[in-house]
Image (cartoon, rainbow, N blue to C red):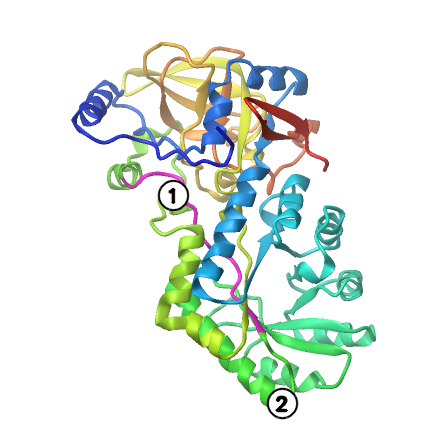
Amino acid sequence: MGLTDASSGGGVGGRSADAAVLRREAEPTHCAPPMPARISAGEQRLIEDQQLLGEIAEVVGGPFHVLFPERVAVNVTAFQAAFLAAGVDGFVYFGKKANKAACVARACAENAAGIDVASTGELIAALAQGVRGEDLMVTGPAKSDELLWLAARHRALIAIDAIDELDRLAELGLPARILLRVLPGGSTSRFGLDPVELEQAVQTVAADGPITLSGFSFHLSGYDAMARAEQAVALVGHCLRARADGHPADTISIGGGFGVDYLDADAWARFQDNLSESWFHADPPTGGYYPYHFPVPGADMLTAVLTHNDLAGLLRDNGIRLGVEPGRALLDQAGSSVFRVQGVKTRTAQGEPYDILTVDGTSLSLSEQWFASEYLPDPVLWPPRSGHPTPTCVGATTCLESDLLSRRRIPLPRRARVGDLLIYPNTAGYQMDSNESPFHELPLPPKVVLRADGDRLRWNLDAR
């Protein structure tokens, strides 16, 4: 069995339904309901291995992240297949801010995907893993002169965010390809060009000059496929008007925001419909939650965008390439974060006992916790042993009261022991390193790359 086969999770039929009822009856009442993550075959194979996780933990000597680059390849291919099925000239740029691992960038290079970068460091890291300069999209506000120079030298596509940025690029005197980033109507975003600035920028770029106006881009917050499709139509209109002035304007980019389906519909509904402060060790999160159940995720969402009002036909008819910049969607089921249990305490809530674990990492390595939210897919306790469901919250190793990987009391299948491992599944998308810090002078968790090799898994440390 390879790393790329997704497990469906759950069963059907009377026997499975009866088992689910028995599980619910056995669950403790003073903790959150179970929210098992959707786990890929690769992650499941790792969990079921009786030795490998323990061996890696012993060698690394602390928390670590596991990455499955083969899964990145599967996700990239799914987006490319959506473009092919729609008959659209499309290109996938991985949003590099979602994960810094070298193996992810290499997987993009090996599977004809580009990378969206926003700093000189990200650009250099992408080139180092074989991504060609012309396959880079350079985004971000107020780009440094160094980033603009390097991007132009490598023929990257540069998304211009402001008039002065365009002026600074022109002063370099280098050939450059640009998109103009459009501020969507009604948006209060600090990014992009408003209508007056946009018109000024179009007029600033000479049709026969060193800077080529390749097209337009935008980025929307949230995960609304229809809004993206409608904004894309507006960009097509900008392209046609720019062509009338002699510009090629043959490309648009609609950014990222392609959702990931972390939990099944029933688990997500149970959490939302019954959410209670009594589930949490301390104050519950106040920042809201990512939509952990996403009915039309990833490449299927791209298909929905292309289908809406026949956007695909509009792109084909006008010879326009569509760029997308997914981050977490290309990392779906491509990695996990692993922590070792260092301590176990027992406390009571509503007169009932629960455990507080202390693990050897920090919640800076599970970044959702630092946005006044909570990463909801349940961790997996390893190794598997028999026992009784135990309400458990998870604290981290710093001296901060707020440093909790899981505020809610999770019904672990048994009581954790010192030396056990907790595996938080599906953390490759933003969770594992966007907020990491060597607080307390603790080392950052290394990234471990896993690949299938026949009937075994082989691992090495990521090159970065």
On residue 245, which mark appears?
2
Image point 81% across, 73% down: which residue? 174
Q: Nearer the viewer, residue 304 or 426?
A: 304
Image point 75% across, 63% down: which residue? 151
Residue type at mark 2 is Asp
Q: Which badge, 2 or 1, is on the more N-terminal residue?
A: 2
Residue at disc 2, secondary structure = loop
Q: Report if residue 185 is visible in the image.
A: no
Residue 262 is a magenta residue: yes
- Say if 180 sits above or below 117 in the image: below
Q: Report if residue 309 is visible in the image.
A: yes
Q: Is residue 36 left or right of residue 83?
A: left
Q: Nearer the viewer, residue 387 or 295?
A: 295
Residue span colored magenta:
251-265
On residue 292, which mark appears?
1
- Label 2, label 1: how many angstroms apart (C-alpha)? 45 Å
Main secondary structure found in the magenta portion = loop
Q: Nearer the viewer, residue 160 or 11?
A: 11
